Amino acid sequence: INLGSYYDAKSEFTRALDSYFQAMKLFEKINDDKGIAGSSLGTGNVFQNLSNNKKAIEYYQKSLFHYKKINSPYVSWALNNLATCYEKNGDIEKAAALYEESLSLKLKEQDFYGAVFSINNLGLMFMKKKDYKKALHYFKRSQMICREKNLEKETFANAFRNLAEVYLQMKDLQNDADFPGITKDLKV
């Protein structure tokens, strides 16, 4: 699985798939649900990187099945990745439901970094659909969690960047409500 992740990160997708398939075969031989789930999740990631959503969904569902079987916290990540595929396929309702389910699990597990990740995915999805009101709702929620949980600076910066992007899309260049210390007299 680690080799698969390494090759995936280097965009050597054929080698990544070979590694994941080898791992999956070994884990299936010994009935190791955690290993099957992990290698299936990685395989889904590679197929998603190759823009093969049909295959990515197939492996994400397999991963989800095995993570649920062992009651793993990684269920939330499999759901999130599955949601991304449905979003790319244009099934916004299904994607939103899966992102929300993932978010709910992450909050229950107090995985606030993961929760912000899911919240941002929801916001970005609605921003692409030009539903700026919903996008703002999610990005403000993300910012709030970053503040309350004192998350790393990069995560917090992403929350600000996403809010700024929505305001730009809305052509609302005067809104500073979410940017303390920035005044309206600033000239862009």
Image (tube, helix red, strand yellow):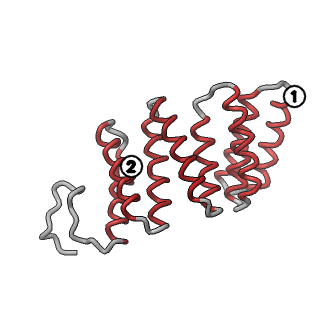
Residue placed most toward the observer, 138 or 187: 138
Q: Label 2, label 1: how many angstroms apart (C-alpha)?
A: 41 Å
| Crowdedness near tag 1: few (<14), some (14–19) or many (≥20) residues, C-alpha within 10 Å | few
Q: Residue at x 48, y 66 (%)?
A: 128
| Crowdedness near tag 2: few (<14), some (14–19) or many (≥20) residues, C-alpha within 10 Å | few
Q: Position of residue 33 (x, y in %)?
A: 75, 28
Q: Position of residue 14 (x, y in %)?
A: 79, 55
Amino acid residing under circle 2: Glu
Indicate whether 65 appears above or below 52.
Answer: above
Q: Position of residue 76 (x, y in %)?
A: 57, 38
Residue 185 is left or right of residue 51, and the answer is: left
Q: Which residue is mark 2?
A: 154
Label 2 residue SS: helix
Amino acid residing under circle 1: Lys
**Which comes before the other along the chain, label 2 or label 1?**
1
Q: Residue at x 44, y 40 (%)?
A: 113
Quarter placement of the N terminus: top right
Q: How many discs mark residues in the rendered view?
A: 2
Q: Residue at x 33, y 48 (%)?
A: 143
Quarter placement of the C terminus: bottom left
Label 1 residue SS: helix
Residue placed most toward the observer, 9 or 162: 162
Mark 2 or 1: in front is: 1
Q: Residue at x 49, y 53 (%)?
A: 121
Residue 107 is left or right of residue 73, and the answer is: left
Q: Which residue is mark 1?
A: 29
Dividing the picture into quadrants, the one containing residue 186 is bottom left
Residue placed most toward the observer, 42 or 19: 42
Indicate whether 137 appears above or below 5.
Answer: below
Dividing the picture into quadrants, the one containing residue 145 is top left
